[in-house]
Amino acid sequence: MNWTGREIVLGVTGGIAAYKSAEVVSRLRHLGANVHVIMTKNATEFVAPLTFQTLSANPVAVDTFSAPEYWNVEHVALAKRAEVFVIAPATANILAKMAAGIADDMLSTTALATKAPILAAPAMNTGMWTAEATQANVALLRERGVRFVGPGNGLLACGDSGDGRMSEPEEIVAALEEILRPRMSLEGLKVLVTAGATRERLDPVRFLTNDSSGKMGFAIAEAARERGAEVTLVKAFTTAAVPAGVRIVEVESTQDLLEAMKIEAPRQDVIIQAAAPADYRPIDVMGTKIKKQEGQELVLRLTETPDVARAVGLMKREGQILVGFAAETDHVTEHALGKLKKKNLDMIVANDVTRPGAGFGVGTNITTLITAAGAEERPLQSKRALAEDILDKVIALRG
């Protein structure tokens, strides 16, 4: 990757691992990146700001209220300048501040203001890392899209041995490269993604649906677009923000979804069906609002909706890659394998929606990627990170 001119903001907090951050700056500078360092006051007790100023050839920011090098609001300027914001070491304290939205020094203020991807390299005592509060903060930050490198396992400065050791500088730089590297691996390909929950009308004001937010499908569509694909997003009801730069096809019911797929699917190279179609619809749809009848039960007669994924599988053409999702509550792998074969899929993404962090509406997932060659488990990760994993597997399946 060409690092020349890439703008990296490095936040350094108060931990003994701060000395490793000097090597991170040195490596990035030798690669050609422009590095701006923000230090907490506690960090300056471990490494002098002059060290980072000399290595980065840029002023080091410490005090939010000090006179800036140039006439601007410095924390805002650095927040806007960053292509990636990396915090190394990331102590339990800064992770807690970020999770709570606290902005009481230069580093936490800039972290809150930036729109750049954030990479955190945790470093702390094992007990602090495994503490319930820290793990809850990490889970929340992952859900918001913060990426983590490490921590590693080994001998810590306090004399303990275990998880909490900051990743080595080369690992941090590699993680930064993974974020910054332009991925045009889908350039020239047409990718269709479905997202959201279909609605099956009972009457003009009521419907049957499910809890799908559309976040997973949107993350896949966005990641595919950034890899150079021409993306079509077939969108049912969603609560997430629609990604920019993709073609949108709106649907409401499962039948609408089927009709849209009949038109759109044949022209696609890759189809990833992350939508959650309803399995049943009312047989009788009322033209006016159903009124409550005092003391009487309301009996609904339901019938199965079309199996959209199976219909797309029957239309599959040579060279086309089909990916499905299986949101299950029991016997997850068994049910997913059945769907893989029945729907003529190349891969199915299976998850147990009853597990914390893996259900509908959250920004994370815990999944198993299943193909004819076997199954690969993915631990708790952001939906965007999972989207990248899915697309990597798609590329491998295409050969």
Image (cartoon, rainbow, N blue to C red):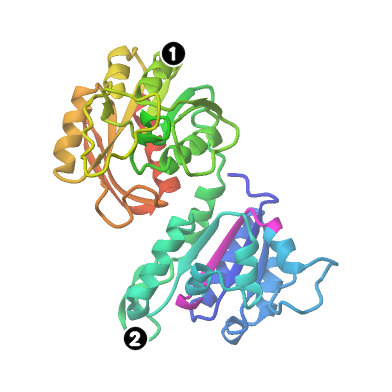
In front here: 205 or 194?
205
Q: Position of residue 191 (x, y in %)?
A: 46, 25
> Which residues are the magenta region?
80-93
Q: In the drawing, does residue 204 fall left or right of residue 7?
A: left
Which residue does the numbered mark 1 point to in the structure image? 263
Instruction: Tell me the quarter of the image containing the C terminus.
Output: top left
Is residue 87 covered in magenta? yes
10 Å crowding of disc 2: few (<14), some (14-19), many (20+) = few
Which residue does the numbered mark 2 point to in the structure image? 159
- For marks 1 and 2, the one nearer the N-term is 2
Disc 2 marks a residue whose amino acid type is Gly
- What is the distance, in whole Å, between disc 1 and disc 2 at their CAs? 64 Å
Is residue 9 in sight in this rendering? yes
Q: In the drawing, does residue 197 fall left or right of residue 80?
A: left
Q: What residue is rendered at 28% in x and 23% in y?
A: 284
Q: Is residue 386 above or below residue 27?
A: above
Write down the quadrant of residue 202 in the picture. top left
| Secondary element at image label 2 | loop
